[in-house]
Image (cartoon, coloured by chain):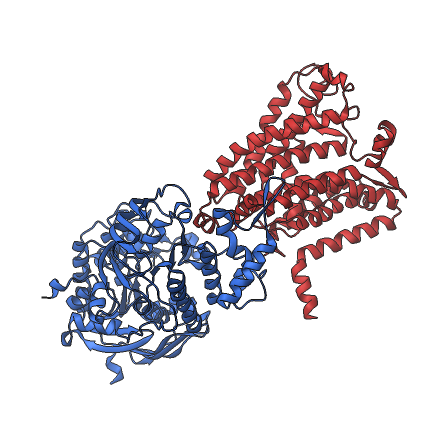
Chain colours: A red, B blue
Amino acid sequence: MKKLKTMLDKFGLPRLIIGLFFIVLLVTSLAIGFDPGVLFSDVLRRVLMFSILVLAMIPGVQSGIGMNFGISLGISAGLLGAVLAMEVSYLSSWTEKLGAGNPWLTLLLALAIGITLAAILGFVYGLLLNRVKGSEMTVSTYVGFSVIAFMNIVWLSLTFQNGELSWPLQGKGLRNTASLAGSFGGILSEPAVIQNTQPAGLKWIAFNVGGVSIPLGLILVFILCAFIIWLFLQSKAGIAMSAGGENPTFTLASGINVDRTRILGTVISTVFGAVGIIMYAQTYGFLQLYNAPLMMGFASVAAILIGGASVNRAAIPHVIIGTLLFQGILVTALPVVNVVIEIGTLPEVLRIIISNGIILYALSKAKGGSSS
Amino acid sequence: MENKYILSMNNISKEYYGNRVLKNVSLQLKPGEIHALVGENGAGKSTLMNILFGMPVIFSTDGFQGKILIDGKEAVIDNPHKAMSYGVGMVHQEFMLIPEFNVTENIKIGREIGDPTPFSKVFGSLLDKMNWEKMSADARRALDDIGMNIDEYAKIAGMPIGYRQFVEIAREIDKTGIKLLVFDEPTAVLTEGEAERLLEIIRIIAQKGIAIIFITHRLTEVMAIADSMSILRDGELVVRKNVADTNLVEIAQLMIGRSVDKFEDEGLINERNISDQNIALELKNFHVDMPGEQVKGIDVCIREGEIFGFGGLAGQGKLGIINGIMGLFESQGEVIVHGKKLDLTKLGEALRNDIAFVSEDRRGVGLLLGESIQLNMIFTAMQIKDAFLKKIAGLKIMDKAKAQKHAQEMIELLDIRCTGTMQTSGSLSGGNQQKVCLARALTMNPDILIVSEPTRGIDIGAKKLVLDYLTKINRERGTTIIMISSELMELRSLCDRIGIVSEGELFSIMAPDDSDAAYGLAMAGVREEVLV
């Protein structure tokens, strides 16, 4: 009995409640006749889609800046990288030599530009956060909002030739939602895309097993990202960074510049934000510009908190558990609500209530079942 | 007989987590008596006052034994508010004033006088209109009582520290029915002139029949003002004396007086060769800007292989010296290690020059409480010396196997009681945490080891072990040790020489077998010639 209690304490009550809620939703949706294959494919896709954005929280938390609500900065860098890569592959002749608009090349280019921009922005952002010690999370929330507003102006004023990107009637400014169908959309995760367009050697990237689609490519990318984070946290620099987050004076007394380790954590977090949004767009099949990423920071923070992280400590299991529960609930809740209530836009309203409700609950339980 | 005392505290005992800090202490005060309470840091003065005020820290740790009588009747004081209603007031060391409020507001805070308004009749007296006239008249009266002619409408912000102290006193005086006023080191932050003024005010208050408990380290002030005094040492009442019957030297002696056990180093190979030619660390005109522990120009040479102690009362600067050397606070002047001048603007400079440090603030600076014993032990050596690392694809990764082996060795060496190398350091007891801190410093394999308050908050058994071990590494490895401690006995049992720090300066360097009186006077910052 006592053992059971310690196990429960370790797992944390909030997670238990949310986990049970998730299971209830799953059972209900299966009971009202949803295809289990489709349901599980959706859950898997959604969870992986958000996973890297959630992973980006770890370096921030460990370095002591708390939850990086300003992940929108990395997201904007990633989106900018993606649109630039698409425009370049649409325009330039050198990509043609390698295969016109080769989706893999576009994806790599998007990542390269996104990561570079994110690293630069992350550095400046880190300098800012070092000046507001003690209220990082408040400041980062506003940084997140402001950068989205600023990027709205950027998206509106960019003039691109690629018709997929630019506003169709005006020729100036970018679309709200740009399809990645002809480009790198789904090339890591969508069985339909892989099986129809890619050569035989790449058919393993995504496939169907018994009605469930397995995005193996995306799974591997997540594992790679998680491995990089894990390895970094075992390294000299990573350990110094985590120590700086846990006890700055201790770290200072060991001759480490804590301001620098905080900047390092911020840069890595921002870079993973950029990678995360590109992977998100790849899975979703669309680039969502303008206000779409506004609340993504909150969703990521909520996910890792539900997973059991605290604002001081976070680890990879928190990311996996948290994203599964948070996104899993969102995916399964909507169809269930749709069937249970059939009045006008009420299901959509309910979906918003549920998702924000979980965020609120996660934030209020920020300490429950923490790692320490 | 009891009745003539305004306060008597009878046979007070108090334990913190099995650590007895007060043993059968009794204290009696007559109306109008000025009673000084003296003792070293940790002698139990604050605990006694906390009990008198019913501070939560006492009752969250199982209360205390003994009785408190006020006006001859037993008083149950289990929260500060009760203490106030019994007429017990306190002037704090750190001022409890709101800077943006004026003098009147600060004096009358919580006891405002209001006139009823239609709103307050409905919603209660919290909505009364403030009666400024009555309030300022009260404030004026209190200020006049202590002979202060400051404007009662002046703002606290921008006032000299001395004035703030007086406003605080006025607030206590203004409380109706005040019978007993406690001054907790009131002169510590004042200039000489202000301090004199304060003593005068204390005398005026006492003449009005209010009993005064005066806590101080400054023995000269005790002599100047107090009628009687109690000396506490190690939680015991040493003696209660009338000031007229004693003198400075005797007080100093009683304050310190304990037999000195010279540390046993038999059985240890002693190959130390200490000479004035071989200087390990030299400080030249060393200033450190550490809040509360200012160092104002220290020159000292610490010889290779010796154990050098820094003693002195809290707040005099002994902690500032070492925190300055380690680069944790800004410093000026020169630090020369083995003839090489350190550039203290560079972080970790001392560490790179083979100086290791065990901080006095174990939980705040000394440990990563959420991390394993293992990581705590190797952290500094890993970061500074690139030890316990292996290279994987150009990335320096922690070598866990090596770290674990080392931690295991250290656990056995220092007899750390734990479940294993992966136990979090935060879940260890104080003594074992201290040993982990020590292990981290030793992992650096230092030339000079600085230990600050190595036995603070750990039990006697662990204390002995830690001190034994420090001597052992000094004798066997020839490590120069600089030890900072508030416990003079500890310094005197271990050190070859002891520097007493007073008001940010090195007051004197003493031998461990100098007399108790000499130590007592040095700690209080009293020069011998003053006495003559």
Q: Is residue A363 visible?
A: yes
Q: Is residue B145 left or right of residue B380?
A: left
Work out whether residue B266 or residue B28 is closer to the camera in this orientation and state it. Answer: B266
Work out whether residue A104 or residue B204 is closer to the camera in this orientation and state it. Answer: A104
Q: Is residue A70 above or below residue A105?
A: below
Q: Position of residue B32 (x, y in %)?
A: 20, 72
Tally the numbered discs.
0
Where is the C terminus of chain A found, in terms of image quarters?
bottom right
Q: Is residue A31 left or right of residue B432?
A: right
Residue at image x 46%, y 69%? B60
Residue at image x 73%, y 54%? A19
Task: Kindly give the residue lying farthest to the left in the view shown.
Answer: B532
Q: Is residue B167 left or right of residue A109?
A: left
Q: Position of residue B371 (x, y in %)?
A: 55, 56
Work out whether residue A81 or residue B67 is closer to the camera in this orientation and state it. Answer: A81
Q: Is residue B73 above or below residue B381?
A: below
Q: Position of residue A349 (x, y in %)?
A: 73, 40
Q: Is residue B119 left or right of residue A9?
A: left
Residue at image x 60%, y 37%? A71
| Image-quadrant location for residue B128 | bottom left
Q: Is residue B335 above or below residue A74?
A: below
